């Protein structure tokens, strides 16, 4: 796998000019929510002097050193995967102070002029979280032999909370004492869990093979696997990664995710309309492997853009439309969704 978990890690999250943005600061927010104990500071100069969830926000790497970080994590996700603005100088400042550097963008740290030499000079390690294993190949069928229940989040669109939903379900399962494992498939998930493969950086022919490798590894760690979903099956840009994950991870069950109020596919220049939840349930189930006909066990709604009353109305409407248990695992907890999954576990 790509990264080994280091419990002594003390993160400085780099979120310069983006910490306020829920979309572009996806990695920063995910790590803050699900790996909070390892975060000692966040860097965002416009917000210097503030704090977030008890984490101090600093304006420079020099200021961050007072909190004794040992690793700087690129906490932003940008369209196209390039570093924003003058971030190259920020990265060089980190390694000049001896901080290891972790990066989830498509641009590799080794390709930044002068950065590898500077890191070597100061004893800093460069780690690209999107770097796939070199020995990946096609799926072999080993995914169907994993001795665990495999649950995959799928969605109506990209960037709607599939990773968040699966993390909440994993946390709730572990609270109940289950041998539950979060299986990361994206750079934020890898940063949170400390292992995994960022499948959007994998050669398309090997994507299902990467997903298979992840569930095989997950099966060695536990017997209830929560696979982080990517993209959406009808997204004109990101559907490939969705289907590759579906067939490569060979899930027994799906949790379908949707953001309340979103009606058009994000990032699609043709503005494709999002299908109804009942249509999506049918589509995902029909696209499953014939040897592993997965069913949608529940609906996870992201209701962050509406009031609590509107959220409860949306949950009730989704349940009435699909006949499936529905909830917002962040706003109201993952208990009901986990219950619905466990009822169907084989």
Image (cartoon, rainbow, N blue to C red):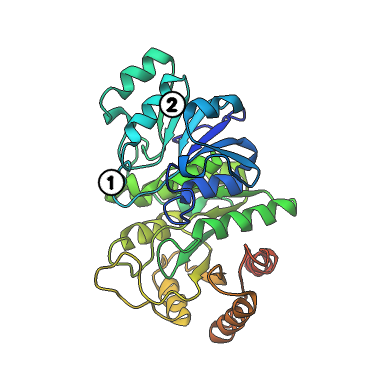
Q: Which residue is pictured at 42% across the width and 50% down the height?
A: 211
Q: Tell me: 96 left or right of 227.
A: left
SS for dot 2: helix
SS for dot 1: loop
Q: Which residue is pictured at 55% across the width and 25% down the height?
A: 65
Q: Which residue is pictured at 68% across the width and 64% down the height?
A: 333
Q: Nearer the viewer, residue 340 or 59?
A: 59
Between marks 1 and 2, how big is the CA–CA gap? 31 Å
**Residue farthest to the right, as pictured:** 176
Does 322 appear above or below 58? below
Label ID, residue 203: 1
| Mark nearer the viewer, 1 or 2 | 2
Count of picture labels: 2
Label ID, residue 94: 2
How dense is the environment of label 2, judged by Cα within 10 Å: few (below 14), some, or many (20 and up)?
many
Residue 277 in picture, x, y percent from top left? 47, 79
Q: Tell me: 36 left or right of 245.
A: right
């Amino acid at each position: 796998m790509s990264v080994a978990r280091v419990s002594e890690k003390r993160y400085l999250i780099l979120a310069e000019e983006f910490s306020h943005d829920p979309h572009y600061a996806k990695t920063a927010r995910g790590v803050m929510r699900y790996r909070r104990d390892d975060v000692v500071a966040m860097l965002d100069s416009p917000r210097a002097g503030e704090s977030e969830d008890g984490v101090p926000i600093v304006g420079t790497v020099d200021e961050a050193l007072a909190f004794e970080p040992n690793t700087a994590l690129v906490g932003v996700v940008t369209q196209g995967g390039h570093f924003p603005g003058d971030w190259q100088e920020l990265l060089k400042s980190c390694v000049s102070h001896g901080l290891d550097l972790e990066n989830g963008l498509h641009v590799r740290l080794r390709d930044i002029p002068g950065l590898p030499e500077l890191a070597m000079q100061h004893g800093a390690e460069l780690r690209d979280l999107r770097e796939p294993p070199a020995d990946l190949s096609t799926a072999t069928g080993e995914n169907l032999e994993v001795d665990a229940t495999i649950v995959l989040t799928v969605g109506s669109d990209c960037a709607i909370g599939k990773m968040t939903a699966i993390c909440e379900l994993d946390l709730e399962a572990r609270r109940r004492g289950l041998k539950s494992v979060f299986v990361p498939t994206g750079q934020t998930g890898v940063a949170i869990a400390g292992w995994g493969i960022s499948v959007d950086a994998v050669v398309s022919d090997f994507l299902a093979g990467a997903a298979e490798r992840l569930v095989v590894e997950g099966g060695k760690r536990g017997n209830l696997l929560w696979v982080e979903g990517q993209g959406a099956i009808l997204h004109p840009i990101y559907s490939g990664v969705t289907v590759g994950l579906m067939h490569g991870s060979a899930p027994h069950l799906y949790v379908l995710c949707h953001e309340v109020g979103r009606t058009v596919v994000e990032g699609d220049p043709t503005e494709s309309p999002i299908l109804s939840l009942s249509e999506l349930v049918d589509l995902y189930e029909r696209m499953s492997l014939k040897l592993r006909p997965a069913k949608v066990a529940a609906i996870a709604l992201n209701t962050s853009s509406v009031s609590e009353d509107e959220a409860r109305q949306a949950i009730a409407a989704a349940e009435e439309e699909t006949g499936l248990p529905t909830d917002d695992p962040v706003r109201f907890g993952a208990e009901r969704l986990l219950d619905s999954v466990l009822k169907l576990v084989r």
